[in-house]
Image: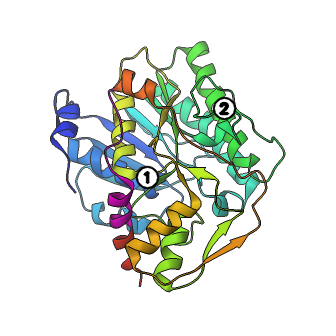
Amino acid sequence: MSVSSQDQSEGKSNMVDRRILVTGGAGFIGSHLVERLIERGDEVLVADNFYSGLRSNVHHLLNHPQFELVRHDVTFPLYVEVDEIYHLACPASPIYYQRDPVQTTKTSVHGSINMLGLAKRTGAKILLASTSEVYGDPEVHPQQEGYWGHVNPIGIRSCYDEGKRCAETLFFDYRRQHNLPIKVARIFNTYGPRMRPDDGRVVSNFIVQALAGEPITIYGDGQQTRSFCYVDDLVSGLMSLMSSDPGFTGPVNLGNPGEFTMLELAQRVIDLTGSASRIEHRPLPQDDPSRRRPDISLAESALDWRPKTALDQGLAKTVEHFRSYA
């Protein structure tokens, strides 16, 4: 684990034995966040039911004196004493959130109610890991936080999209009704080491297929776009948001504004892996967004945050992670 001097200065100035709960802390993003919090000097409690998270993501922390792990489903109440809550728990890849869509909605809604209730009881500051999916298939480009979105409420992605939209509603109603200190981050496509090879996300799909020499599957004509943020940059954004001015709640976009087509991403993966894989086109899934790019001007001005990792640099590190599975 390593932390930049900037990250150290963010947290070292007011280290005061914080006890922090990270729901979904054994997941891809959560495990990187947990590492950074422990490095900063915090005590961290991870609650995860391992539906999509992996115990191996935090195995190296099990004996750390500042780390505690509990197997818990956030759709049930959790009774602990904490100072801050990062609420990340929810399957975030289509394969996992569509496998049990009712449970996905319950995780976003019941899980948020339970974590907000915990925050209210303990007086903890709480951050919601929301998603760019609240914008749906956007009619505004790039997406700004003031845009209300274009979401199909009854489609196959609705369990996640609408679940997160409802979670945001709950957070702001708790703020208005109970003056709860909240933060809401809208996370755009994030990638990096510890992504699951079977999560169905485009970066992991392409890398796994390229390393195996299999056809790289592109849905539709490949001209749909995404913006990819390396996980270290995203974690810095989440920590900056949590430590931001109490009056700043968000929602705030956290992502990399660099925009790439699926064909461009596939070619970069082929080049980085030296693969001979060919590209294979398949029908576009229902409600798949055609364009996705964050406007991060609010994050830049309110948090002094912007991503630093170029796509090729981050992809190279991610490829090395997936080579370890071979």
Looking at the rendered structure, the secondary structure element under dot 2 is loop
Would you name the residue on which mark 1 appears?
29
x, y percent for residue 91: 59, 55
Mark 2 crowd level (few <14, some 14–19, many ≥20, 10 Å Cα): some
Q: Which residues are magenta?
A: 304-318
Q: Is residue 268 left or right of residue 304?
A: right
Q: Does 115 sit above or below residue 14?
A: below
> Mark on residue 37?
none
Looking at the rendered structure, the secondary structure element under dot 1 is helix
x, y percent for residue 257: 46, 40
Quadrant for the C terminus in the image: bottom left
Quadrant for the N terminus in the image: bottom left
Q: Is residue 316 magenta?
A: yes
Q: Is residue 109 visible?
A: no
Would you name the residue on which mark 2 appears?
140
For image coordinates 22% across by 39% down, the residue present is: 7
Of circles 2 and 1, the one toward us is: 2
x, y percent for residue 3: 20, 48
Under mark 2, the amino acid is Val
